[in-house]
Amino acid sequence: MNDKRLDRLALVSKVWPWLFLGTLLVFFEAWARISAHRSFVFNAYNLQSIGLAASAPLLLAIGQTFVIITAGIDLSVGFVMGLAAVCVAQFTIPGGDSPWILLVSISLTILVCLIPGLVNGVLIARLGVPAFIGTLGMYGVARGVGFLAAGSGMTVSVNNRGLAWLGGGWTPVILTAVLLVVMHFVLSQTKFGQYTYAIGGNPQSAIRAGINVRRHLFAIYLIAAAFAAVGGVVYTARFAAGAANAGEPMLLDSIAAVVIGGASLFGGTGNVIGTLIGALIIAVIEFGLVFIDVNAFWQFIVVGIVIILSVLIDQYKDRLGGAQ
Amino acid sequence: MSGAGVTPILEARDVSIRFGGVEALKRVSLRLMPGEVLALAGDNGAGKSTLIKILSGVYRADGGDLHFEGRPLQLRDPQDARSQGIETIYQDLALADNLDVGSNIFLGREPVRRRFGFQVIDRPHMARVAREVLERLDIVIPPRKLTGPVKMLSGGQRQAIAIGRAIYWNARVLIMDEPTAALGVPEQRKVMELIRALKVQGVAVILISHNLHDIFAVAERIVVLRRGEVAGERRVAETDGDEIVRLMVGDTYSNDAH
């Protein structure tokens, strides 16, 4: 294999999510201009809608990025998010409209949601259970507990001014952006991030290099659970109600965002910015198709094709790289 | 025996270990002199891997003791051995294939600098050291590939990175397990050259190999193990392949031939 072609291929696989996102935006922009004489991109409402649509799966996807880089997967984050959405509603209700109750209810919610993360960590890092199976177990447990906590109805309404502020306007988008920047820094600049990649590349090598792989995996499943909890809190804040199934569609979107963003499910690659682009692609497709009045079910088909495409590009690159 | 009067850098005295009912090593002794290449030969199951795992702190011997530069040596784990300057390169090289050369040299021991009040990994320093280490070993890797994942490099280049990592961390003793087993002929030659370069730099090497050609090319002495015991020890200058093979398979059982 000649080097130039390999270089070009590496470049394509790196920039194609950006190109694809750009193409989508240009397409919808052109459509909006031609058919309705208005702008798709330069429209605060559209941008906010896309930002909000992207932020919920993105919160899960940030934690999922770390998990997938270590060659793991966390199937429980969707229902942990639902559990958090119900918990934060239930914990806030007794305090009425007081802003102080929020400090308590949000902290308590995150603590509760760290429990499934802790169990995932024990199962995967200590007992050597495959991540797929361990987190599938917690998927069921969190799902059941979430619905039980929600009581007879599936949703728990809550009215709190502080919570409404947290979920209003651009706040969820800004919160997500801040967390995104922090976690991008952690993954790309710190030892913690470096060890995440090292474990995904070769766990045996990481162990021999003196990296505490168990403790690291433990921390990563806790992070995934914490981000799911934040996702749940934001959901309840936005809709003034917590639903146990709030995160159900977010789970696959979070995995899709990570994969479209360039991560391999075999571990070792991926990054937070890629995940951001992946989540934006999904959100733009979802919002854009509704915008141009295409049946909403098409979004599943388009997103599905994008996922397959991104995996194919990744595999093609790896095969050429391996053949070297 | 060789180097009488000089203190061995690493010595094993009457080392024994058993796994369940199997006595894997029976009172094995071995002396490694400073700057020497010592080959460890033996058939499969002779105890070569077990012995190097004791020397590198992976296993703890049931009997016997280890000495480093004449002082008794206690190894609780591989980190212990490494901090003494005993580095081991296993067949799988223990590289993180998805990371670049610098990251692999510093794996688990990354240098940090302060930025925005946080400890961040000092990547420019890592890249600089990667270039220096490869230069020292006379390994040419295009700069473009220096910053890519090491899985894009050849087997010999990857072996060189593992060796470079060991010497960067001031290995005094380098234990290499079948370093040429997975390599093509030109790459095998390159690795043999590397071992000779290490010798010049004063690093003592224990070389485990099936390949007698390799052993005779770089080693000064050969210790042959057979069924967990030392079957014989020969200076390369005073023996030949046939004799070593006989020692390995046990036609002449000569602990006391010298």
Image (cartoon, coloured by chain):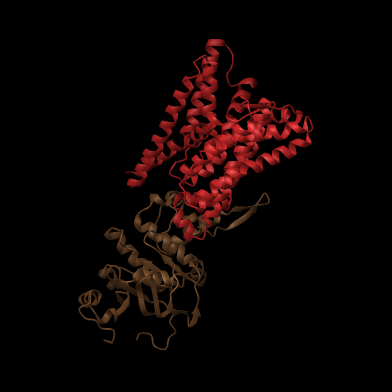
Chain colours: A red, B brown
The residue at 75%/28% (across/down) is A160
Towards the viewer: B223 or B201: B223
Q: Could you tell me how many numbered marks the image carries?
A: 0
Residue B7 location, x and y as percent? 44, 84
Q: Residue furthest bottom?
A: B5
The residue at 36%/61% (across/down) is B91
Horizontal arrangement in the rendering, residue A85 relative to residue B139 (left or right):
right
Q: Where does the C terminus of chain B fall, quadrant-wise?
A: bottom left
Residue A99 location, x and y as percent? 78, 34
Quadrant of the rendered image containing residue B197 = bottom left
Residue A262 location, x and y as percent? 47, 38
User: Please, is residue B98 above or below residue A28 in the view?
Assistant: below
Q: Where does the N terminus of chain B fall, quadrant-wise?
A: bottom left
Quadrant of the rendered image containing residue B243 = bottom left
Q: Is residue A265 visible?
A: yes
Towards the viewer: B205 or A231: A231
User: Please, is residue B141 above or below residue A254 in the view?
Assistant: below
Q: Residue furthest front?
A: A152
Horizontal arrangement in the rendering, residue A279 relative to residue B95 (left or right):
right
